[in-house]
Amino acid sequence: MIADAYERFTGWIFEALLQPLMYEAGLMDWADEAFHWMDFFVFGVIQVVVVVAICLPLERWRPVEQWDSQRAVRTDVFYTLLARLGLLPMLGFILFFAASARIEGWIADSGFVPPTLETFLPWLREWPLVALCFYIIVLDFAEYWRHRFQHSVGWWWALHSIHHAQTQMTFWTDDRNHVLDDVIAALWFGVIAVLIGVPPGQFPVILLVLRLAESLSHANVRLDFGRVGERLLVSPRFHRLHHGVLSVSNSGKNYGVLLPVWDWVFGTADFERHNYPRTGDPGAPAAYVKGGWLAQQVVGVRQVWRALTTRSG
């Protein structure tokens, strides 16, 4: 029902607003591509609205920190708008639209049907909500390991450290990532989703759940979920320990996105419920801390090159 309402809404927007403009400009040959791009944009707007509606009141309710200047936070707002509404969705659409057609063609020609999660658990076909939970759990597990690799691989940390350099962490910080890091994350997430057979209709829901969890976990709010809840869902307090100065300087803890169980199983959990440390990376370049988006992207490329061309990288 929600999916049908969303399709009607995006269809109305396309027919009422975008299609007339394309007709006047003589671009109707690109109508299908424009509709898919608009779908990316509308879904991005929904994500931003949902995240702001939930996280902003929480941050105003019980903030961990208050700052005289909001400049660094405004940079993160730009990161979010660019990631959810701008360049990255457009690049993702262009790349995946071209690649998916070729991949589907190769699979069809070979006659090979890749196994999915429902191949091993056929009963999931009769229980879509249970299947949705399974997909979320598997993808959350994959995100946990991607996050650990970001911290353990030298050149990848050179990119990811932009995210950890923020000393004024808020829910906007979730999208504070280098463009190359976002591209890798999109490929990682997309390929795994395809391999386990996530249905197209469920993919946006999964993405929204995990995006909301990540944004909430970065919120500048003094909030934990209690002794039991902290072991079921990642809270702002749980993830703030991961961004703490000491955590970045040492081995790091609390990599989970939605479920802390992976940190618990693999020995990276810290459940110190009353600790809300300062955030930031003391070893980060100055541009990572105080620079704008463009400066951080440029320095990020230099940092990656330096990591790749040294023995430790």
Image: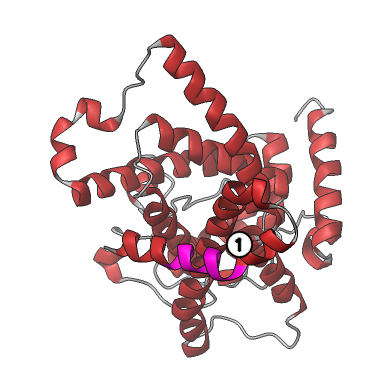
Q: Does residue 138 sit above or below 163 in this rendering?
A: above
Q: Is residue 10 magenta?
A: yes
Name the residue nearer the viewer: 219 or 113. Answer: 113
Residue 240 can be seen in this image: no
Is the residue 185 above or below the residue 11 in the image? Answer: above
Give amino acid for label 1: Gln
111 or 78, nearer to the observer: 111
Residue 10 point in image, percent of width and height: 47, 64
Q: Is residue 49 magenta?
A: no
Residue name at image x 38 percent, y 39 percent:
266
Q: Quadrant of the N terminus?
A: bottom left
Q: Where does residue 226 sit, x and y in percent of width and height?
A: 29, 71
**Vertical arrangement, residue 242 with respect to residue 48, above or below:** above
Quadrant (top left/top right/bottom left/bottom right) for the C terminus: top right
Q: Residue at left 38%, top 52%? A: 206
- The structure residue drawn at horizontal position 61% and vertical position 51%, both measured from the top left corner, is 31
Residue stretch rendered in magenta on the structure: 9-17
In the image: residue 36, left or right of residue 294: left
Instruction: Give the dominant element type of the magenta stretch: helix, strand or loop.
Output: helix
145 sits to left or right of 111: right
Of 92 and 27, nearer the camera is 27
Is residue 213 at all visible to an observer of this figure? Answer: yes
Task: Identify residue for label 1.
Answer: 19
Q: At 49% from the left edge and 41% from the top edge, which residue is drawn? A: 189
- Residue 154 position in % (x across, y down): 70, 35
